Image: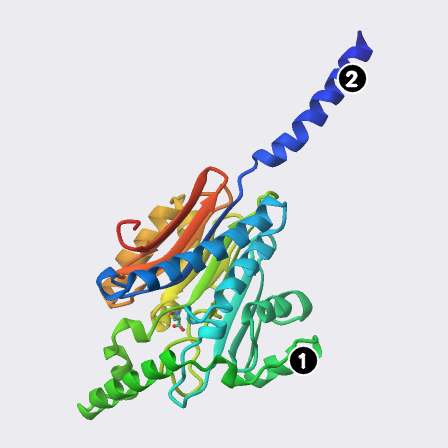
Amino acid sequence: MKKITLSTLVATLLFCLPLQAAERPIAIAIHGGAGTIEKSKMTPEREQAYRDKLREALDSGYAVLEKGGSSLDAVVAAINVLEDSPLFNAGKGAVYTYDGRHELDASIMDGKTRAAGAVAGVTRIENPINLARMVMEDSPFVMLAGEGAEVFAQSRGVKLVDNKQFDSKERFEQLQKAKEKLEREQKQDKDYQAAVEQLPSPFKMGTVGAVALDRDGNIAAGTSTGGMTAKRYGRIGDSPVIGAGTFADNRSCAVSATGHGEYFIRFNVAADICARVQYQGKTVTEAAGEVINNVLLPVGGTGGVIVLDASGNMALTFNTKGMYRASRSSSQPSQVAIFKDAE
Ligand code: ASP
């Protein structure tokens, strides 16, 4: 009798263990920037190209999770697809600085350990998110900037590329337009920062990011960007700043942000959202809504966030006309959207 009970128990365990693992939720959300994105101003072909690339990034991140891979691997896989596309302002599609160069920022955070890595103002790194991860996993530091980050990259076997590799006709035209607008504003007695404030949001946005939850219950977040068109003086935005543009802690949530970086730094956006989840018991939707709409919007801070908790709850929240975004979880099929109204 005892023997039967034992073997039944073993059989039940053997049957249940893989099932349990398969039942644990997995989830991923990605963004490709928020801003004045209007359907009327986009050709159907261009819209389709964005949707296809978002879907490809989502699928590659989700495939990692489905195979039992880590949330960090999923975040990097999704971001690499977007960095390698000229459509988004990160990696290949990075915008121009005022001086006609490209300076890239990225960061990543592991929600299990709160380990983090970031690079700022790098000019010769093809996939800055990969280097941010190396900083996290293979250095005693959290953030490396400029040339130093590139020396570190070389020491770890990363091939440096020519800054010209990020050149594109479309982004160059954007720079010329941004400079014309800046000059017009500055002629009206405005300093550079005040003139930048007057630039329409398409000149300030387009970052990419991802948040993911793996089968082990760990969440992670990552963000990568070329920053703002016509940025000057070594300007660094929120994307490589842990707590501002990126944050992850299993006890609260994972966040990747996009928008006018100066506001996201000043209002510590990513960490504030997770603090509301952790200390006030807010849902990710409530916390993101409060910070994006009630804190940022009244002071003129535009942009959005993707947020995910360790149970797989997601919020994709923005206060602009649109945000390139996509999400999928074990309980929700793929969704790709660009404009408001989940379209
Ligand atoms: N947040 C980025 C920055 O300020 C820009 C963006 O999200 O598009 O550098």
The residue located at (64%, 83%) in the rendering is 151
Point out residue 210 in the picture as x, y percentages from the top left corner: 48, 58
Extreme residue toward the right, this view: 3
Question: Are dots 1 and 2 in contact, CB under 8 Å?
Answer: no
The residue singled out by tag 2 in the image is 7
Q: Determine crowd level at label 2: few under 14, some 14-19, many 20+ residues with C-alpha closer than 10 A.
A: few
Some atom of ligand 1 lies within 8 Å of the CB belonging to the residue at label 1: no
Q: Which of the pair 92/323 is nearer the observer?
A: 92
The residue located at (56%, 61%) in the rendering is 76
The residue singled out by tag 1 in the image is 154
Color theme of the render: rainbow
Name which quarter of the figure residue 72 lies in: bottom right
Amino acid marked by disc 2: Ser
Amino acid marked by disc 1: Gln
Q: Secondary structure at mark 1?
A: helix
Which quadrant: the N terminus?
top right
The residue located at (26%, 66%) in the rendering is 36
Q: Which of the pair 222/229 is nearer the observer?
A: 229
Extreme residue toward the left, this view: 188
- The relative height of residue 328 versus residue 293 in the rendered view (above or below) is above
Q: Quadrant of ligand 1?
A: bottom left
Point out residue 204 in the picture as x, y percentages from the top left corner: 33, 74
Residue 215 visible at all: yes
Q: Secondary structure at mark 2?
A: helix
- The relative height of residue 105 versus residue 250 in the rendered view (above or below) is below
Some atom of ligand 1 lies within 8 Å of the CB belonging to the residue at label 2: no
Q: Looking at the image, tell me whether mark 1 or mark 2 is earlier in sequence order.
A: 2
Name which quarter of the figure residue 220 lies in: bottom right
Name which quarter of the figure residue 44 lies in: bottom left
Q: Determine crowd level at label 1: few under 14, some 14-19, many 20+ residues with C-alpha closer than 10 A.
A: few
Q: CA distance from mark 1 to mark 2?
A: 56 Å
